[in-house]
Amino acid sequence: MKGVMAACASDTGLVRKRNEDSYFVGGSCIAVADGMGGHNAGEVASSIAIETVESNTALLETGEMEPAECVREANLRVLEAASSDSALSGMGTTLTLAVWDDADIKVAHVGDSRAYLVSGGTIQRLTDDHSVVGEMVRSGALTPDEAHSHPGRHAITRALGFVEDLEVDQGTWGFGPGDVVLLCTDGLHDVVSDQEILEAVMAKSGDGPEAICEFLVAVAKERGGPDNITVAAAMRPS
Ligand code: MN
């Protein structure tokens, strides 16, 4: 736990009027959420998801609560808020949450916000996109290259705010000295490739996680910033 540095950067981008992404950095947790819904409902949904992480940080840190359990609680809170206010009905959000200890990192997620692990000069995607296109790639119907420009790539198949009994993916990976775990919403990974994310992390890791996050947000904006962009990173010094 000691020694890990974490940071986040978030930007509305150049096309959208509002930033409906939310994020959290605190304790031994980082999280990003990408809200959807009319008016400001997407913003409300992603904020509720992130507030749920924030209120459970102590339990997540001690391992008393699994990250996936926290994601399920966030889902129930989003559903509850939507059912109590008709203006919020139909709102939803992604949530990707990473929690580390002295040796490992656990990642739980629902939706198409991703987690990556950069270790030993290579990048590994830790999450499957819960999107129509993501499922087509996993079934072999599309190549990752075809998926990148597919017009249906934003159609999400799983998100918080739709069903009570939500299936949440969770995994555990080694998180050793020099490793960087990076979370991002689709506003980054739609316009910046995995290889470019790796190169950015390698180039900027000497300046710390804040420099990594800010650099990647700037690259997404150079590419037109078509969506809200949020990047969170945790780095264990070598
Ligand atoms: Mn987005």
Image: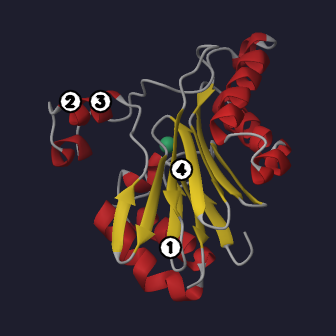
- Badge 1 local density, few (<14 within 10 Å), some, or many (20+)? many
Badge 4 amino acid: Asn
Q: Secondary structure at mark 4?
A: loop
User: On screen, 113 above or below 88?
Assistant: below
User: On screen, 236 above or below 167?
Assistant: below
Where residue 162 appears, as percent x and y from the top left, is 59, 16
In whole angstroms, how far apart are the C-alphas of marks 1 and 3?
Answer: 28 Å
Where residue 46 appears, as percent x and y from the top left, is 67, 37
**Camera-side residue of 75 and 27:** 27
Q: Nearer the viewer, mark 4 or mark 3?
A: 3
User: On screen, 102 above or below 131?
Assistant: below
Is the CB of mark 4 within 8 Å of ligand 1?
A: yes
Sequence-wise first label, 1 or 2: 2
Q: Which mark is residue 228?
A: 4
Badge 3 amino acid: Glu
Q: Which mark is residue 139?
A: 2
In whole angstroms, how far apart are the C-alphas of marks 3 and 2?
Answer: 6 Å
Q: Nearer the viewer, mark 1 or mark 4?
A: 1
Residue 190 seen in render:
yes
Residue 152 seen in render:
no
The answer to which image quadrant residue 69 occupies is top right
User: On screen, 137 above or below 21?
Assistant: above
What residue is shown with label 1?
179
In whole angstroms, how far apart are the C-alphas of marks 2 and 4?
Answer: 29 Å
